[in-house]
Image (cartoon, rainbow, N blue to C red):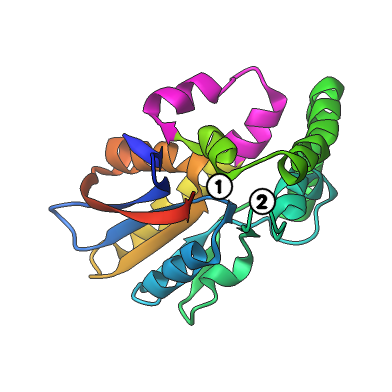
Amino acid sequence: MEIIDAGLMGVRSAVLRVSRRQTPLRFTIYPMVHLGEQSFYDEVSRRLRDHDLIVAEGIIGASAGARKLTRTYRHAGGHRKLGLVEQSKSVVDVGVPVVWADLTGSEFDDGWRKVPFTERAIATVGAPLAAGYLRMFGSREVLARHLKLDDDIAIDRWDPDSGLDRLVSDEREARLVRALQDIHERRHDERIDVAVVYGAAHALPVVQFLMAKLGYVVSSADWVTVFTY
């Protein structure tokens, strides 16, 4: 399954709709890229207005650890050469109820302190270096090569022995799937469309959970352009 496509014309994100024959509730997955053209975020916001509920990514409250890890996006966003902007929480501010299915700032920082020192040091130093490289030498084509994502790439990137992967991926995905399961259990008989707005790296585990545990299937999909070259 392809989540982020990096083709000749640019980068696209696959919007996936999952549903069950037995019940009317539908989930629509929006795999987000945290650095893109403003038009990408505007289009996602436009679509979200048609949903009944939004389940969103976003550390709840201040987190020193999260700020260190997101430094690449914050420093590269708005740089004139790239012409891209950083995703903000305002993407989901469209007048639709929002469930923030993520860790609190204190929970994230507690987890960050448990990550092995070497991993924390590499991540802390690597984020500003990556941002500096993008600002000085990077291009949209270079960025695109790192954004492409499908089943095989996701498996290759995930390291079960990495403390950072357990924090950034496993713990946050567990929080997300609990929220989705709760919505399914309480509202599966309602004819509503629930948007899931989360980082692209989390999209495949979420779809796999909905399919394997709750019996949903991917019923349709289309593309939204993140940025062109």
Residue 179 appears anywhere in the view: no
> Could you tell me residue 212's position as x and y percent?
29, 35
Query: Which residue is the site of mark 2?
Result: 103
Q: Is residue 12 above or below residue 6?
A: below
Callout 2: SS? loop
- Mark 2 closeness class: few <14, some 14–19, many ≥20 residues within 10 Å: many
Q: Nearer the viewer, residue 9 or 70?
A: 9
> Could you tell me residue 121's position as x and y percent?
86, 28
Instruction: Check if mark 2's residue and mark 1's residue have beta carbons within 8 Å.
Output: yes
- Tell me where the magenta segment starts and ends, as one range: 149-171
Callout 1: SS? helix
Disc on res. 175? 1
Q: Nearer the viewer, residue 206 or 199?
A: 199
Which circle's residue, 2 or 1, is located before the other in the chain?
Answer: 2
Q: Residue at x 77, y 42 (%)?
A: 136
> Could you tell me residue 143's position as x and y percent?
58, 39
Inspect the image, locate mark 2, and give the three-letter code of the amino acid beneath it.
Leu
Q: How many numbered marks, from 0 up? A: 2
Inspect the image, locate mark 1, and give the three-letter code of the amino acid beneath it.
Arg
Left or right: residue 221 compared with residue 77: left
